Amino acid sequence: MNRRWLALLAALAAALLVVACAAPIPADYAAEKPLLDLREYFNGNLVAHGIFTDRQGKVVRRFTVQLKGSWQGDEGVLDEAFTYSDGKTEKRVWHLRKLPDANGQARYSGQAGDVVGTAEGQAAGNALRWSYTLRMPVDGREIDVQFDDWMYLMDERVMLNKAVMSKFGVRLGEVTLSFYKQT
């Protein structure tokens, strides 16, 4: 490899390192209120409204989710029923677990039928970062897509969620959701 290519690769690696270091972490929100406890928020009936935007920011899909959560101690079930603007429906049932806290952060894990492996989450203050791989049907086949979810509790009823979807490190689009806890 010639020097020019080595210099270019070194500059690219340095730029990626700077970007990676600048990313937020849950601890950045430790002082924010109200405090998010998934066992409290995802307990009972909720409704969410969301959009999927492509890489250019164009809304390509809208949806509503009816959710019902229940917890027994540190074990929870979150039943999600999706209805898309084109009339299609989808169901996902999460089996959640509250793990022991670490470094002042609440930790959670979760599994669902279309999630590859185990989802992992860390919460601090009003924020939760939830990371997982979702197996999705696309054009008659299934692909695995990584989700980097950030959820922010606004008040006791409203939570906002923004997720970046990627494959092989390439950003595919974003999902934006607004959850509302029903009484």
Image (cartoon, rainbow, N blue to C red):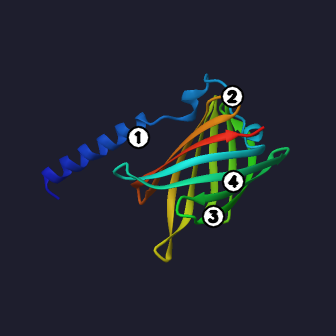
Q: Quadrant of the C terminus?
A: top right
Of the residues shown, which amino acid type is indicated by label 3? Glu
Please name whichever residue, 20 or 161, is drawn nearer the observer in this view of the structure. Answer: 161
Of the residues shown, which amino acid type is indicated by label 2? Leu
List the residue tagged with mark 4. 110
Of the residues shown, which amino acid type is indicated by label 4? Gly
Q: Where in the figure is residue 112, as x and y percent of width and height?
A: 68, 61
Residues at badges 3 and 2 in contact (C-beta under 8 Å)? no
Q: Residues within 10 Å of mark 2 (few under 14, many from 20)?
A: some
Please name whichever residue, 34 or 89, is drawn nearer the observer in this view of the structure. Answer: 89
List the residue tagged with mark 2. 35
Q: Quadrant of residue 115?
A: bottom right
Name the residue located 69 percent from the left edge and 53 percent from the top edge: 110
Name the residue located 53 percent from the left edge and 58 percent from the top edge: 85
* Mark 1, secondary structure of its residue: helix
- The residues tagged by marks 4 and 2 sit, at their Cα atoms, a distance apart of 20 Å
Q: Where in the figure is residue 139, as x and y percent of width and height?
A: 46, 74
Q: Quadrant of residue 155?
A: top right
List the residue tagged with mark 1. 20
Q: Earlier in the sequence, mark 4 or mark 3?
A: 3
Residues at badges 4 and 3 in contact (C-beta under 8 Å)? no
Q: Earlier in the sequence, mark 3 or mark 2?
A: 2
Q: Quadrant of residue 93?
A: bottom right
- Which mark, by number, is residue 90? 3
Mark whose residue sits in front, 1 or 4:
4
Mark whose residue sits in front, 4 or 2:
2
- The residues tagged by marks 1 and 4 sit, at their Cα atoms, a distance apart of 25 Å
Q: Residues within 10 Å of mark 1 (few under 14, many from 20)?
A: few
